[in-house]
Amino acid sequence: MTDFVYAPPETAPEILHADAQVLVVNKPAGLLSVPGKGEHLADCLIARLRRLYPEVLLVHRLDLDTSGVMVFALTPLAQRHLGWQFEERVTKKVYVARLWGHLAPSAGRVDLPLCVDWPNRPRQHVNHEKGRPAQTDWRVVRLEPDGTTRVRLMPLTGRSHQLRVHMAELGHPILGDRLYAQGPARDFPRLMLHAESLRFRHPEGGKAQTYCAPVPF
């Protein structure tokens, strides 16, 4: 977007857990997970973490405007193990979002294939011929008096912008989404999407662990 100005928050990364293999962090909204193209986009979460943990390695990403739980590896073995868990859907991710309008029914699944919308990238779109499978489960938390809906979203796949496109396709875009929402649904101070919890198996020993970050909206 031509009016985009990168102004990441200055707060230090919030460490939720650290051991010899993994690092779990609560990413703030407005901060890139990894560097973008150009010096003005060099400030990012992994760069900030590298000052504290020089050995940190990327496993997955959250969008710039999405906040919440991320896991990083501290050894190549942990990176491979965690990467395999994401690819094989061993991890369990739960997001909280606020949507435009009142969503019904109270629970369901979106099953719509996605791929990049090349003339309008970085936008993604539904494409039944070229898209990759994408599924998202939702569960309504509550219908708000202001006409919005608070939901929990459980992605079964990990496509780019998956939750944002799927909710927009339902006719209930995520509030503050400058790419997929229209009109007053866009006019919020941030994207109302937060990675509330992440469950994975520890690379050393395989014990299941769940980490959570409070929803900031």
Image: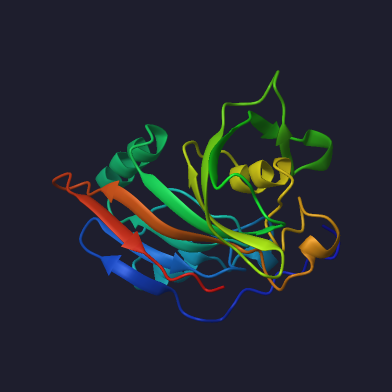
Which residue appears at 68% of the width and 74% of the height?
7
* Occupied quadrant, residue 52: bottom left
Judge left or right: residue 156 versus residue 143. Answer: left
- The relative height of residue 82 versus residue 13 in the rendered view (above or below) is above
In-front residue for pair 203/43: 203
Q: Residue furthest bottom?
A: 11
In the depicted structure, whether residue 163 falls above or below residue 21: above
- Residue 69 x %, y %: 42, 61
The one of 10 and 57 positioned closer to us in this rendering: 10
From the viewer's perspective, tell me whether residue 77 is left or right of residue 48: left
Image position, residue 49 (x, y; %): 42, 68
- Indicate whether 115 appears above or below 137: above
Q: Quadrant of the N terminus?
A: bottom right
What sort of colour scheme is used for the picture?
rainbow
As drawn, the residue found furthest toward the left would be 205
Residue at (63, 30) in percent of width and height: 112
- Residue at 68%, 43% in the rendered image: 165
Q: How far from the left and from the top, in percent, is residue 109? A: 54, 36
- Quadrant in which the C terminus is drawn: bottom right
On screen, residue 85 above or below 96: above
Count of numbered marks: 0
Of 64 and 151, nearer the camera is 151
